[in-house]
Image (cartoon, helix red, strand yellow):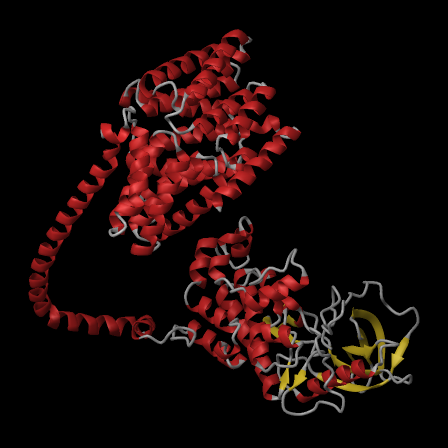
Amino acid sequence: MAFKQSPGNSESDGSNATTAPADSAPSAEIVIGPYRLLEMIGRGGMGEVWLAEQKKPVRRRVALKLIKAGMDTREVVARFESERQALALMDHPAIAKVFDAGSTPEGRPYFVMEFVAGMPITTYCDKNKLTTRQRMELFIQVCEGVQHAHQKAIIHRDLKPSNILVSEVDDKPMPRIIDFGLAKATSQRLTDGSVYTRVGAVLGTLEYMSPEQADSGGEDIDTRTDVYSLGVVLYQLLAGVLPLDSKKQVYEEMLRRLREQDVPRPSSRILTQGADSAITARDRGTDPPSLMRQLRGDPDSAVLKALEKDRKRRYGSPAELSADLGRFLRNEPVSAHLPSAAYRARKYIRRHRLGVAIAAAAVLLLAGFAITEAVQVKRIAQERDRATRERDRVDRVARFMTGIFDVSNPYAARGHIVTAREILDNGAKEIATGLSNDPELQAEMMGTMGSAYNGLGDYFRAQSQFEGAFEIQRRIFGPEAPKTLDSMFLLACTLALENRNVEAEKLLRQLLEIQRRALGPEDSDTLITMSELAASLGGQGRFSEAETFYSEAFDSERRIDGPEAGRTLYSMMALGYTLREDGRYTEAEKVEREALDICRRKFGQEDPTTLDAMGALARILLSESRYAEAEKLAREDSEIRRRILGPEHAMTLRSVEDLAAILSHEGRNDEAEKLFREALVTVSKEKETGAPADAWYELACAAAVAGRHEEAIEYLRRAIEQGYANPDGVATDPDLKSLHGDPRFDALLAKARQAAASNAK
């Protein structure tokens, strides 16, 4: 058989194959007919493959496959002879040629193949960084070889990258299909004993096996089973992963998934690979977003059609699959798409852009006058309908607002003093029922409610509202509509506020990819999303990645909007925070001082942006052990927040905790203790803000930073007991890093995970 040189190959005969060691040269010279065995290059359950030298009638190196001693059972011999006969029937450049066959003096059958010094097709493509187009062109040659085998009534049944070797001929890649050890004849008996499949046995490689092959043990199959295996190989060539990951899967579970689980689109698997997506794209000469775009549409459709679980819906032959790939490469319609008029028209326009443009201009010129007249009539009707709809919407909003404020009715309230929180909660309940007939308005009101809850620091309820708005708008307007993207952004920001940065990162990466494509890399929305993505990375401690995004956003914003624009300041302050967390205090201080000077001059001393800049600079000075300067800024920050936001607001509590931490570092423990206790009393009394869990969590972070581990554990316990169910935030928050390794911290983290799972249900 044709085998690669190193490392050795193994046969696909259903057993656990092993690779021959590199030093498997025979201790004494072994000669079989005109062939001298040099070294073993592969060993499987039934046979051995040797690199051999033929001296006559021609001198060349060959691959000699020989049944292993003691394995000459009727079944194994039948399978071996079937492979030998199958190869003898075929003559194609993509299938390794058979030269000779015979038996040793001991009666062990063997046959001789050309020796191919190649590597698996996936390895070759990645090593040589072949593009998506080049991979498809190479794969088409593989399909042609399998089609040739089918025309000879031979089904391979074990197609996979290690059985498709690629070598270079005249500096061009040439695939060779090897290992027909599981080949099955469809129209004639290969040998007198060619039916050797055991009932109930699954033969082949599970990751590349068709559902019907897994179900029948190889009996109830036809040429379409090879089409499925080709689809798996194509999926791996394009997306860099298998369609169904078998890692850590027990055998029976993998069989179930193979038979039942739908295969995701190759394009959707790019970003789900995490950091590996960059490697996958690089091996294809591009970046992850570009690779996703290359695979969307026709490539996705072709691969999924090859991987249809119902073989009636699958390509009928490798020729049909390769024909569709060829059509895609020529910008022609592919059969895997529904042949709608619009789809065929798009393909035609791509091939004949100039002619279509000239024809379209002529048609438009002739139709222009008639269309103008029709538009005028339609516009009048639309304006009338729009006015009617707007009037109805105003009525619905009025009824809704009246309903949510009904809780303030003294009779309904029964003498209880109604708070803004209760009005919001009542409104959130009414949205689901009172506006169900107008989902567009329902989504808008959910967004408004989400922003209101965020303003109160109740991020959990804000998340629920933004999730509702996002799902409704995605269903009504589509996944890339502006309103849908706005809700997606707000949801991601809220998750970040809850320290759920992994989930936030996933949403923001999706959003950024859409905005870069649709709006451009320097659009204001694109840059804002870039900054938020950087924040989520920073929240996970990935500061180098965060700095890259912040710096890119900051440079673009300063050039486009100027150094004093609001979003420029935000990116500047965030960049300073990231530099501080990365330990680059001098650089961080320079950036934050510049930001604070601009904020004071532009917004005034009591603006939230100015206060954020003050707190950020105070934390940098604390890191530099410049306690007096840090205390002055932190005290001013906390006093202003207490006066404007109130003592119970999460941002006020955080500023108080920052001040207490500074005092603790100065050795003024009594003053620090007093501030901590005041914050603790505030949290204990606070019932109406709806966020006691967040406040307890902030206290835990501050205590941990100050080295007060016992208090930090106690505060964290109370936060989780009162509903703080964000295990990702607890596990990755840098403020809690000093608690890692404490068994009590591990127990609390497990409790947070349990609570999060319960909330998800």
What's the residue at 50%, 69% (across, down)? 303
Tell whether 345 sits left or right of 20.
left
x, y (%) of residue 322? 50, 77
Toward the viewer: 7 or 258?
A: 258
Q: Is residue 626 above or below residue 693?
A: above
Q: Is residue 196 above or below residue 629?
A: below
What's the residue at 29%, 32% (across, down)? 423
Q: Is residue 746 above or below residue 14?
A: above
- Is there any visible trace of residue 524 in the rendered image? no
x, y (%) of residue 499? 47, 35
Toward the viewer: 375 or 722?
A: 722
Locate residue 566: give its quadrant: top left
What's the residue at 31%, 19% (across, down)? 644
Toward the viewer: 469 or 362?
A: 469
- Is there any visible trace of residue 227 in the rendered image? yes
Toward the viewer: 668 or 620?
A: 668
What's the residue at 79%, 72% (across, down)? 45
Locate residue 614: give its quadrant: top left
Q: Farthest residue to the right: give it.
A: 28
Tell whether 636 sits left or right of 733.
left
Q: Is residue 416 above or below residue 66?
A: above
x, y (%) of residue 348? 32, 74
x, y (%) of residue 104? 88, 84
Count the labels in the image: 0
Image quadrant holding the N terminus, namely bottom right
Tell whether 49 sits left or right of 468.
right
Tell whether 64 sits left or right of 528.
right
